Image (tube, rainbow, N blue to C red):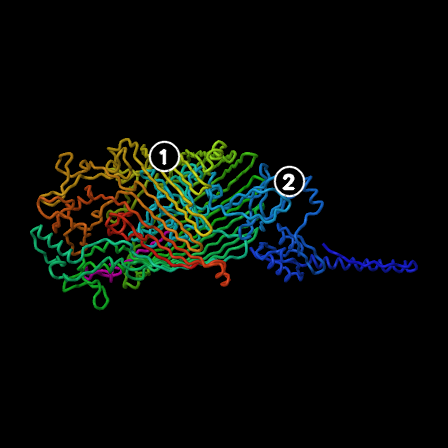
Amino acid sequence: MYKLFNKPYGMPMRLYQKILLIVRLTTVILIASLLHVSAATFGQRITMSQNSRPLKAVLRELTKQSGYDFYYNGKTISDNQKVTVILSNVEFQNALNSVLAGLNLSYEIEGKIVTIKPKKPSFLDRVVSAFASIDVRGRVVDDKGNPLVGATVAIKGKNRSVRADQNGAFYLENVDENDKLVISYIGYQTREVDAASDMGSLTMTVADAKLEEVEINAGYYRVKDRERTGSIAKITAKTIEKQPINNVLMGLQNRISGLDIIQQSGVPGAGFNIQIRGRNSIGSGTQPLYIIDGVQYPSTGINTANSSAILQSSNPLSLINPNDIESVEVLKDADATAIYGSRGANGIILITTKKGQSGEMAVNAYISQGFSQVGRRTELMDTKEYLAMRMEAFKNDNLNPSPTDYDVNGVWDKDRYTDWQKELIGGNANITNSSVSLSGGNGTSKYLVSGNYYKEGTVFPGSFGFKRIGVHTNLDFGAIESRFKANFTATYSNSISNLMSTDLTSYIALAPNSPDPYDEYGKLNWNYNGSPVVFNPMSFLLYTIDANTDNLITNANLSYRLLKNLHIKASIGYTTIKREEIAKSPLEALSPSYNPTPADRSSQFGNTDNSSWLVEPQLSYEKTFKNSKLQALVGLTFQQNSADYRNIRASNFNSDELLGNISSASVFSITQSDSFKYKYGALFGRLNYNLHDKYFFNLTARRDASSRFGSGNQIANFGAIGTAWIFSKEKFLQNSVSFISLGKLRASFGITGNDQISDYQYLQLYNSSTPYQGIPTLITTRISNPNYGWETNKKLEMALELGFFKDKITMQTAYFHNRSSNQLVGNPLPPSVGATIITANLPAIVQNSGWEFDASFQIVDNQNWQWTTNFNLSIPKNKLVKYPGLSTSGNSTLYIIGEPLGIKRYLNTSVDTQTGLYIFDDTDKNGLQNDADKYLHKFIGQSLYGGLGSTISYKNLSLDFMFSFSKMNGFSYLNNLNYAPGYFSSSIPLNNQPKEVLSRWQNPGEKSDLPKFSTTTSSYLNFLIGKANGIQSLADNSFARLKNVSISYSLPKTLISKLKVDHVALTLQGQNIFTLTKYPGLDPENNQLISRLPPLRTFLMGLKVAL
């Protein structure tokens, strides 16, 4: 308001006319002056963005931009009173109103002075307050004074609510004075307050991830955890960032019940075996569906056949920076996955990347440095033990060493010892990981831009490794109440790997007195004491594979509010992965004894190109009634995946230096040239009903069309229904058992399809064959069958969820029961047909069931100490229920009705007490070892697995650790041995043995599970049959592993304020610290004695800074 002071003066009558004229002129001047002052006042334009700044500082900024001075009592504005305001070219008085919105303050303007004082209700305000409805205004903020943009402010018991704006302010008209307001915001405790004209600042308290507040991404929709009817588990960035990993799958291992992830190798970029709730099918794929920001992402390996030996199957998620991921949701049951149709038959992994947040630009930086190493060794024989084994073998065979028995005949030094584990896989793989992100925005737009760099070496000799550089961006447009909203996400990465073609782990069984691999000049050693060295493990370092991979994921989500409760949406996505590989085989790597020629120089030039596009228009409707809520969704899916694989072998180079230049070769052959195109379309719908926030019903339907089937079989219908009942909200329980904060029963049933087979299997396939009289020929390799159709899977789940003492203790138990039928398999054909397989439906039925248990405990939670513990356990079980004609099919030796799919058949084997060789029970008494003798049936796989984790925090120090465990049957160490104990091969002398073989048979009459040491070929063949088909090739590979440890220390606020930063934290992280197991090999989980590099033990030290 403005205060104008005019002193009155008396006027003589004779001067009346003159004074009247003067008054008129003065009035004109005063009005002009007032207009000038007003124009000056409102002409000042203010632009500022203040995020949780002290009010005094904001007023100083206003003074700087406007020239107005502020006066107030020291008690009126406290030092810790903070505001958040975002203004752009706003008039001064409007800016001042925004700054003071929700604060119990008023102001007066006199000239260039603004006086701020506590607001006092006027007489009229008090009258209105007493006798009429009121208008309510206020601000919703967090404990730091930051606005909670989008917080819901609702009138309890009435269908009226508003959302807080970009400054956290809200306004409600015509509110009854006796009404109560319910304020809610995701991640914060719901608050209930009495309505008043001026609510001031309403501070919300973090909900400590209580179930009713945690929001779950279910793909096409979002749902509060407490209200979900399906089985969905969530892992957030907070958990992922505590682990020193280069693939997000490593961060999910043993943290989610029902999710089984096994890392195949410790080589960077290698593959994983992933199953959600076990194996449902005999022949179809078991990989889950990956969805990143709404776009399908490849789940199969991206490498060519050139690098399959070293990488197994390179997982495409290794191309994604884990630090760019905000959350991962795993969808498990029919209710959760049915909306994705057949694509989600094996479960779904939804990945949501990070997005920008409102406020001033925030900068977050992270850098870490560390190393990886083999964490577990196999105890192999030293030279003394090895030579004693060899001499005992000669004694048992009544033989003497031959001229080619270099290890014992004096050619090789008998006093020499090389620890080949140390030489070949004993190095440290250095790791550098760094990232930086910038984010910010206001109520109408938000942005995030981040960049990352990752480099990891290998434990092998040489400078091999993996590098990845990437950029992630997200742009979000549209205020909360805007009709139109848009979100754009793009993630790009370039990965470069330089590896050898062979995993050197398989060579650690080299005889311990083998010659030095290098001569005195540092060259490969191909001659030792006058005898040729035909096997040199270091020569495999020259067989290199260089790969360059580009990865791009883009997505646009557009939505428009047609009516108050009706939205039209569209999701448009495109992904592409392009990889080029060069596998070089130089002449230098060959022993001179082979007389190599330039024709032996060769390179494989391979490339893969995977791309997909996706368009999904959707229409959603949501209506809230007095005691219920209805949601409906309908949509369409249009998708196309394309894949091209090319591999060209070039040879006859003139120099090893030219192997990377294909034009330098003179001989070429195409070893692979494949193109695939997969088209998929669908119509889907969802109907969800919430009654009294206690009873929930979810109905999903989908009509799928897939190009992987022949005409007439391409379309199928699927659907699911899910229900949930929160019985803890029933009055009879609330009044009698107050310590139960959540009691919930849920169940679901649905039918899903499966088209996880290769493309074009219904078509006849021809391949080129040996030319006949110079004429190219074709042979049939696959018989056409356009009649096979969809594999179907009926899924049932029942679950109980409990929370005690305000969810300080939560528990969940789930039972699932799946039955798949109409199995899609490749049936083997007899040779007379001319083709090897035919894809068809089998009338077989596979039952897959199991139990899952999850629990979390908030043990301590006070000002200084916090301690939480979580636990998960999975007990999977499957079996073949029905398979008509199994005994006469090509699968008769693989499966048994009533037994798990992972069953194996074995001979009953023992060691003859007189000869020391394996003997086998001849069950059918025909004098032969055949399949009929394999009457012992053993399951290979996990019978239970899980994890136990805990987080302990004291003030600024935090410790997080997690144990994983598994009860499993696997292959014994015998299965991985290259040769029988005592046997020697000079061409590939991988003859060393684990010390476990020292418990072998030695003398007639002795009982032992291991045969005698022998050098003969017949004993070697006897050993091979025993280790492959005998019952002694199995073992208990159960283990417990300290999977992850993370220690974090945040610098005190008093210190970081001096550094002028928002947050600084020091971290120490470890992965695969140690393993407890009876298995003697490198890794019990992979049944790896010595054949493949195990998952590595990793340590990283890091620094996090927020500006």
**What residue did someone put label 2 on?**
177
Question: Is 22 one of the magenta-colored residues?
Answer: no
In this rendering, position of residue 226 left or right of residue 1025: right
- The outermost residue toward the right is 14
Mark 2 nearby-residue class (10 Å; few <14, some 14–19, many ≥20): some
Residue 399 is situated, as x and y percent measured from the top left of the image, at 7, 53
Type of amino acid at the residue the image marks with label 2 = Glu
Q: Residue 171 occupies which quadrant of the picture? A: top right
Mark 1 nearby-residue class (10 Å; few <14, some 14–19, many ≥20): some
Question: What residue range appears in magenta?
Answer: 584-608
Mark 2: secondary structure? loop
Res 119 seen here: yes
Q: Residue 582 occupies which quadrant of the picture? A: bottom left
- The outermost residue toward the left is 398
As drawn, the label of residue 434 is: none
Mark 1: secondary structure? strand
Type of amino acid at the residue the image marks with label 1 = His
Question: Does label 2 or label 1 sit earlier along the sequence?
Answer: 2
As drawn, the label of residue 817 is: 1
Residue at 28 percent across and 61 percent down: it is 461
Residue closer to the observer: 163 or 1094: 163
Residue closer to the observer: 685 or 384: 384
Res 1107 seen here: no
What separation in Å lies between label 2 and label 1 (alpha carbons)? 54 Å
In this rendering, position of residue 461 left or right of residue 710: left
Residue at 28 percent across and 31 percent down: it is 884
How many labels sit on residues? Answer: 2
- The outermost residue toward the bottom is 521
Question: Is 586 one of the magenta-colored residues?
Answer: yes
Residue 705 is situated, as x and y percent measured from the top left of the image, at 42, 38
In this rendering, position of residue 915 left or right of residue 725: left
Asked if residue 246 is positioned above or below residue 296 in the image, the reply reads below
